[in-house]
Image: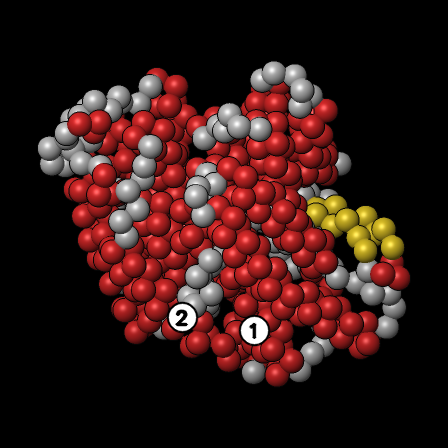
Amino acid sequence: MHNVWWINSLLLVPLLGAVAVVATRRVPRAAYGIGVATASLELVIAAVVTLLYSWHNTVSASCGAKVCTGFSLLTTEDFAHRWVLAPSFGLAYDVAIDGLSLFLVLLTAIVVLLALLGARESKHEAAFVGWLLVLMTATMGSFVSSDLLEFFLFFELTLIPSYFLIAHWGGKERSKAALKFFVYTLFGSGFLFVGLIYLAFSYQHAHGGDLTFSYLVLQHAAISHSAAVWVFVAFAIAFGVKSPIFPLHTWSPLAYAEAPIAGSMVLSALLAKLGTYGLLRYGVFLLPQAVHTLQPYLLTLAVIGILYGSALAAMSKDMKRLVAYSSMAQVGFIILGVMSGSSIAITGAVLLMFNHGVITAGFFLLIGFIEKRRGTSEVTSLAGLQRPAPVLAALFTVVMLASIGLPGLSGFVSEYLVLIGTFSTHTWWAVVATLGVVLAALYLLWAYQRIFHGRAEGENAEMPDLSHRERWIIAPLIVLILFIGVYPKPVLDRISPTVNHHVLILQQNTVTK
């Protein structure tokens, strides 16, 4: 039962923090203190869950012939809890954590805390902190939901705080960016809703009883191959908009560029992962009978996204847009792994979700530090920053090389697993996707040269380096980049059992077909 307490606390703590912020909104500086304390407590809980999950996973690995339930090989008494609220309507509170969601839960806690510490907004501070904590609740809820309707509700709830973060604290075109983001994502969510309703009613029609949206139950929904394909397409549209996947990406460059730094961090590091996680969990693993039919199309879109995103990143004159297009390319690698059918590649894709979140959060934090000093993120307005700000340049170098995929840093491990796994199942897609690694080196090194090399003049020559506080804020991300790059085993050991379990089912379904 103590594990049930931990997983429920992940949702309760940020929600109570948001309520406390609203209640003390007239007290000077109270909101920020409550926000940081809440996010810090959430990170502690997420870290404890990560450690406890490791121990229970070891204990449960010997279940042998026993039929294990829950999201992964764990039993439902570990990190899973279901409470039926209204059986006739299919309403239930159903939460669980497995190897797919574990590190995304940890990533959510890390990113929101660092967003509060490193991208603080002084204007309407209480509202800013409150919306971030609500967004943390919705994101956590999405990652731990084991019920499709519950997932949909949390998935939709992320729209509201994200919209207000962009619209109230964004740049000059914030209203346009916020509206475009909201409309595109809401449009995609309509497909998700239709798909999950179809699955639930199909199961009820075939088996009778009460309506249910349970993930574990709907895995056994008896639907035709053609119906599964159409439901998968509906889910792919919804998650493709959120990720974003080419060609459903057109909202993202404007939203990333106009959002405040905290908003950009959350959009790229967390909400984009909701899309890739959703495609893997509710597309590939819930509808395995449709994967074989749709694999060529989604693999092709993934490769196009890698190359197209890289080309646009190379032409970008704004650092935030450059990271937005770079993220589009990285999402292409994730989709490549997700749709590969290889346990190695899918494991790499799940790891890349976490690593890319860490890397993009680092990028946007550093861009925010530059914006605070220079008032711009335009590449053409910056030059020679390496001399006045050597620490900033060094940290930017580490994050940049991790994004390129330099061996010894976290980006290499995940991209390597994705490519070698995909090569074993879909060789030519992997070969073409490898060009994305070369292109990433091209556009990121070129951007680095334009920003940090050359002669610093005017305000660039006088730009102060990072303060000690800013160095401590970015330090956890640098440590994660280095640690996972050198020793990824603890992370992979927690991801692999879940992936292997689901891939075995996927392969059995393919053989049967």
Instruction: Kindly identify the residue that appears in the image at 50 percent across and 29 percent down.
Output: 121
Closer to us: 258 or 144: 258
Q: Find numbered disc 2 in the image and state the secondary structure of the residue it sits on.
A: helix
Instruction: Kindly identify the residue that appears in the image at 75 percent across and 36 percent down.
Output: 1
Residue 30 falls left or right of residue 366: right
Note whether 303 is above or below 7 in the view shown: below
Note whether 51 is above or below 36 in the view shown: below
- Confirm whether residue 495 shows in the render: no
Residue 186 falls left or right of residue 332: right
Q: Residues within 10 Å of mark 1 (few under 14, many from 20)?
A: some
**Which residue lies under the disc numbered 1?**
233
Q: Find numbered disc 1 in the image and state the secondary structure of the residue it sits on.
A: helix
**Which residue lies under the disc numbered 2?**
301
Tell me the colour scheme of the image: secondary structure
Instruction: Kindly identify the residue that appears in the image at 54 percent across and 44 percent down.
Output: 167
Q: Residues within 10 Å of mark 2 (few under 14, many from 20)?
A: some
Q: Quadrant of the C terminus?
A: bottom right
| Residue 112 position in % (x across, y down) | 52, 35
Q: Amino acid at mark 1?
A: Val
| Residue 47 position in % (x across, y down) | 55, 32
Corner quadrant of residue 258: top left
Note whether 295 is above or below 274 in the view shown: below
